[in-house]
Amino acid sequence: MLTEKIKESLKKSWGDNAEALNCFCEVKIQERNGKWDCYVYAMNPRDEDEVMCIMKHKGWVGISQWFLSGLMFEYNTQGEFPRFDPEFRRIRADVLYKKLGGT
């Protein structure tokens, strides 16, 4: 799941930094069939379940506010739950957004 170090970094990004994508995506959550990816870049300091992320879904890229608990229980047709991508390396949110095709 999320380490305390990652949580602290995400909490610092909440607010103005998140609005401007002036922070780092710290984790990537993947739907196992590849339908969507969620790159988490901010966490509400008062509610660790509430996060901001860049979503990529079937070619669409956008900014979303989600609840981690909701994301993690979105199972696919095979009954598989999403997973944290262990290979993901942090990247600036604004750079990733443009790289994924966001405008």
Image (cartoon, rainbow, N blue to C red):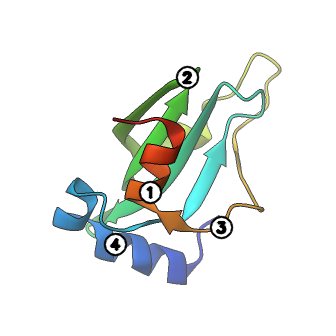
Looking at the image, the residue that sits furthest to the top is 77
The answer to which of marks 1 and 4 sits earlier in the sequence is 4
1 relative to 80 in the view: left or right:
left
Q: Would residue 77 be found to the left or right of residue 60 on screen?
A: right
Find the distance from the CA under tag 4 to the CA under tag 2.
Answer: 28 Å
What percent of the width, then of the height, locates residue 74? Answer: 61, 30
Q: Secondary structure at mark 2?
A: loop
Please tell me the numbered disc located at residue 19. none
Q: Amino acid at mark 4?
A: Lys
Q: How far separated are the C-alphas under marks 3 and 4?
A: 18 Å
**Distance of mark 2 from mark 3, alpha carbons?**
21 Å
Q: Secondary structure at mark 4?
A: helix
Mark-to-mark CA distance, 1 and 4 = 20 Å
State left or right for residue 88 relative to residue 71.
right
Residue at (68% x, 28% y) in the render: 75
Q: Which residue is mark 4?
A: 11
Closest to the camera, between mark 4 and mark 2, is 2
- Label 2 crowding class (10 Å Cα cut-off): few <14, some 14-19, many 20+? few
Residue 59 badge: 2
